[in-house]
Amino acid sequence: MSGTDHPTLAFIGCGRITRALVRGLVAAGHTAHAMRGVSRSGAGALALSREFSLTAADGNAAAVRGADIVVLAVHPHETREALAALSGLLGSEQTLLSLVASWRTEAVAAALPGVPVVRAVPNVGVAVGAGATVLSAGPHADAPRLAAVERLFAPLGETFVVGEDLLEAVSAVSGAGPALVAHFARSLAEAGRSRGLDARTAAVLAAHAVRGTGALLAQEGVTVEAVMDSVASPGGMTEAALRVLDEDEVSAAVRRAVDAAVQLSMGRLARA
Ligand SMILES: NC(=O)C1=CN([C@@H]2O[C@H](COP(=O)(O)OP(=O)(O)OC[C@H]3O[C@@H](n4cnc5c(N)ncnc54)[C@H](O)[C@@H]3O)[C@@H](O)[C@H]2O)C=CC1
Ligand SMILES: O=C(O)[C@@H]1CCC=N1
């Protein structure tokens, strides 16, 4: 543990989700010097060391030595090679925290005998303390290990624990969710532009619509229906707009989008 009782962290893979995590963790008071990172070419780790003072480690051994939690954040197709390179470097006192989509914990654990494995699906909201992180305990990960990982993510938003079978759906709805919502925000802004708003005003108004809706929905007991009802004056503009979304089956399109993501993940699911 580092001086502040925060775990010492090693990131294997320094791309998008690692950057979001490191940003959130630094804002939550983690000291950058208790975080090390390695990336394939070194460029990702170097970029994070410049932005957040994370230590760009000279290889896996230097990164994981003394780390409490080793975060695996590489692509599914890069995972076999990354795990092979970690072989023999980790001990049972450490936790391997896998963020890798489509890799079951047993498959990860099979490559690292005796090392406790926890799988997490965070989303990029963790960068600003508004993430959702869904966890599942894998082989050798007892309740205290899982609790330690929950404590890591707790300041970065909400945490949930589910059975691993649900993590492909979680990855599509929550992991990919911010991109789906951003897609809608872009459509809203483009529609505003087509009605005469300048690009910046349209983008800012769409962003605030998303932000305000998120803040309202985050309040206890507030439902999606209640938010929609609070906006839609009877016989008014909102009802006219929502009718078009229903006629154009936007909900069905979103369901197909989530199905496509889940199917892709199931198709490449790595099991032990
Ligand atoms: N981006 C997101 O919002 C989320 C991503 N994930 C998962 O996290 C993983 C990483 O995703 P991203 O950060 O988006 O990808 P990315 O492409 O941005 O980053 C991947 C990083 O891994 C590095 N890398 C590849 N092989 C390596 C190796 N053998 N040793 C060390 N570093 C290596 C690359 O250099 C790169 O820095 C994926 O499995 C993804 O499914 C999960 C939830 C959300
Ligand atoms: O796009 C992806 O495959 C990853 C998993 C969920 C979010 N990003």
Image (cartoon, rainbow, N blue to C red):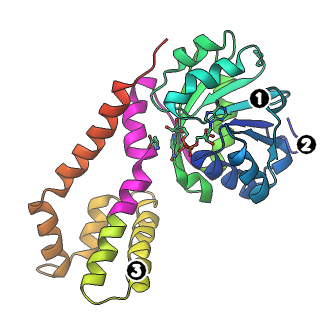
Q: Earlier in the sequence, mark 1 or mark 2?
A: 2
Query: The N terminus is located in which quarter?
Result: top right
Give whichever of discs 3 and 2 has the lower sequence position. 2
The dot on residue 230 is none
Q: Residue furthest right?
A: 3
Magenta range: 157-183
Q: Residue at x 42, y 39 (%)?
A: 171
Type of amino acid at the residue the image marks with label 1: Asn
Furthest-front residue in this view: 41
Q: Nearer the viewer, mark 3 or mark 2?
A: 3
Task: Specify whether tag 1 is near ligand 1 (CB below 8 Å).
Answer: yes
Q: In this rendering, which labeled residue sits more in front, label 3 or label 1?
A: 1
Q: Residue 113 location in percent, x, y?
A: 67, 9
Q: Which residue is mark 1?
A: 60
Q: Ligand 1 falls in which quarter? A: top right
Q: Crowding at label 3, few (<14), some or many (≥20) Cα neighbours within 10 Å?
A: some
Mark 2 highlights which residue? 3
Element at label 1: helix
Q: Amino acid at mark 2?
A: Gly
